[in-house]
């Protein structure tokens, strides 16, 4: 850190750049990418904890959560939590995820995501925040899914 001399004491000069601390454009870009990734992982953990509190069940670790959301089961259960009149547990396809674990994604898993989107609409969340079904199923834009769990 660079310090500025004052008659009474030395105090740090925040925001100053010393010549040997200057970063190249590539280094700044890399730091920005790392900060964005770090913030996303923090938000992913926050979303996971919030969903676990709502669903009262353990979700996959943050490193596996995106993949765990693709089948829409957790999203469907979340929809049941905040819009129980709109989505019942019976409407969630592959609730126990047995088919998903056995054979992988099935197109009917998108029904769970659609139920979640309808539940968000029923509670009045503005549509601008909604991800697309393909954002979930095909992992086209998982950050949008994570930033909008419901």
Image (cartoon, rainbow, N blue to C red):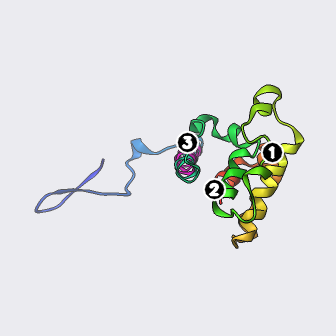
Instruction: Work out which residue is located at the far top of the displayed protein and give it.
Output: 102
Q: Which mark is residue 34?
A: 3
x and y, in percent, of residue 46 in the image? 52, 50
Q: Is residue 132 visible?
A: no
Q: Is residue 4 left or right of residue 46?
A: left
Q: Secondary structure at mark 1?
A: loop
x and y, in percent, of residue 39 in the image? 53, 49
Q: Secondary structure at mark 3?
A: helix
> Counting residues from the N terminus, which is met first, the one under dot 2 or under dot 1?
1
Point out the frontmost of discs 1 and 3: 1
Q: What is the chief secondary structure element of the magenta stretch?
A: helix
Q: Residue at x 64, y 62 (%)?
A: 82
- For the image shown, how many numbered marks are present on the structure? 3
Point out the frontmost of discs 3 and 2: 2
Q: Which mark is residue 93?
A: 1
x and y, in percent, of residue 150 in the image? 65, 60
Q: Residues within 10 Å of mark 3 (few under 14, many from 20)?
A: few
Task: Tell me the distance, in whole angstroms, between the alpha carbons under discs 2 and 1.
Answer: 23 Å
- Queried whether the magenta region covers residue 54, the answer comes back as no
Task: Tell me the distance, in whole angstroms, between the alpha carbons under discs 3 and 2.
Answer: 18 Å
- Queried whether the magenta region covers residue 40, the answer comes back as yes
Q: Quadrant of residue 100?
A: top right
Give whichever of 58, 40 is nearer the camera.
Answer: 58
Q: Is residue 97 above or below residue 19?
A: above
Task: Tell me the distance, in whole angstroms, between the alpha carbons under discs 1 and 3.
Answer: 37 Å
Q: Which mark is residue 147?
A: 2
Q: Is residue 134 left or right of residue 52?
A: right
Q: Which mark is residue 47?
A: none
x and y, in percent, of residue 66 in the image? 67, 41
Q: Please state the extent of the stretch shown in magenta in the rendering.
A: 32-47
Contact? badges 3 and 2 (CB < 8 Å): no
Q: Secondary structure at mark 2?
A: loop
């Amino acid at each position: 850190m660079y310090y500025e001399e004052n008659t009474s004491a030395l105090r740090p000069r925040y925001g100053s750049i010393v010549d040997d601390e200057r970063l190249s454009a590539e280094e700044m870009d890399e730091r920005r990418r790392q900060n964005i990734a770090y913030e996303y992982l923090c938000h992913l953990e926050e979303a996971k904890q919030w969903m676990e509190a709502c669903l009262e069940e353990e979700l996959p670790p943050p490193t596996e959560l995106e993949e765990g959301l693709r089948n829409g089961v957790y999203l469907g259960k979340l929809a049941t939590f905040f819009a129980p009149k709109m989505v019942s547990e019976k409407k969630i396809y592959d609730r126990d995820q047995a088919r998903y674990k056995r054979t992988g994604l099935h197109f009917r898993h998108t029904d769970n995501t659609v139920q979640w989107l309808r539940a968000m609409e029923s509670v009045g969340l503005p549509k601008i925040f909604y991800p697309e079904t393909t954002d979930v199923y095909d992992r086209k834009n998982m950050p949008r899914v994570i930033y909008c769990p419901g």
